Structure formats: C-alpha cells, structure tokens
Image (cartoon, rainbow, N blue to C red):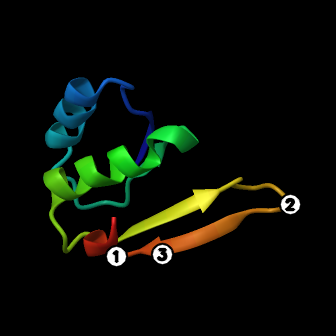
C-alpha cells in the first residue's frame, strides 16, 4: 500500500503510523535520508519488532541499493 511521504514532525509521523498499525499489507513509505533512523524507530514503536522492513536507496535508478533490516538493529 503506497503511503508516500509521512509528516516530517515526529508527533504527526507517529500518529500517522499508529493509524496504520493494523495494516497487514506491505507499506511503501518515502522518507528523506536525514529522517530514516527516526522513522524506522517510530515504525518499531507502531508495528512492533516482528514486522520486517526493507530500506531502498535510489529506487528505480542505476545505483539502487536495498537493505533488509532487523527491527532490533535500528
């Protein structure tokens, strides 16, 4: 399910993620490079450590990089 960009402010971002906590489909979220860590931490708080996450840099471009991350390592 494509969700685009989340709110930049922490409280609003956490509220949006909380509204998605029961969503079982794959979520596609865009995030700026300087907020990735905070957003992943907020995702763990909203979805729990059992939810898998993948981070993709430069999606659909020549130098695309994909990282499978474990929630406990954020």
Identify the residue position indicated by label 3 in the image.
68
Q: Report how far apart the C-alphas of labels 2 and 1 lie in the structure.
A: 25 Å
Q: Is residue 12 above or below residue 19?
A: above
Residue 8 location (% of width, % of height): 39, 26
* Residue 20 falls left or right of residue 67: left
C-beta proximity under 8 Å, tags 3 and 2: no
Q: Where in the figure is residue 58, as x and y percent of width and height?
A: 71, 53
Q: Are marks 1 and 3 in contact (CB under 8 Å)?
A: yes
Q: CA distance from mark 1 to mark 3?
A: 7 Å
- Going from N to C along the chain, the mark reached first, 2 or 1, is 2
Q: Earlier in the sequence, mark 3 or mark 2?
A: 2
Q: Residues within 10 Å of mark 3 (few under 14, many from 20)?
A: few
Q: What x and y, as percent, mark residue 49? A: 19, 70
Residue labelled with disc 2 = 62
In the current view of this chain or complex, which residue is farthest to the right? 62
Regarding mark 2 in the picture, which secondary structure is present there?
Answer: loop
Q: Quadrant of residue 62?
A: bottom right
The residue lying toward the viewer, choosing from 15 and 3, is 15
């Amino acid at each position: 399910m494509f969700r685009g960009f989340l709110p930049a402010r922490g409280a609003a971002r956490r509220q949006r993620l909380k509204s998605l906590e029961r969503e079982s489909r794959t979520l596609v979220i865009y995030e700026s490079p300087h907020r990735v860590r905070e957003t992943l931490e907020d995702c763990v708080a909203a979805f729990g450590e059992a939810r898998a996450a993948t981070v993709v840099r430069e999606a659909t471009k020549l130098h695309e990089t994909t990282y499978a991350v474990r929630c406990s390592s954020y």
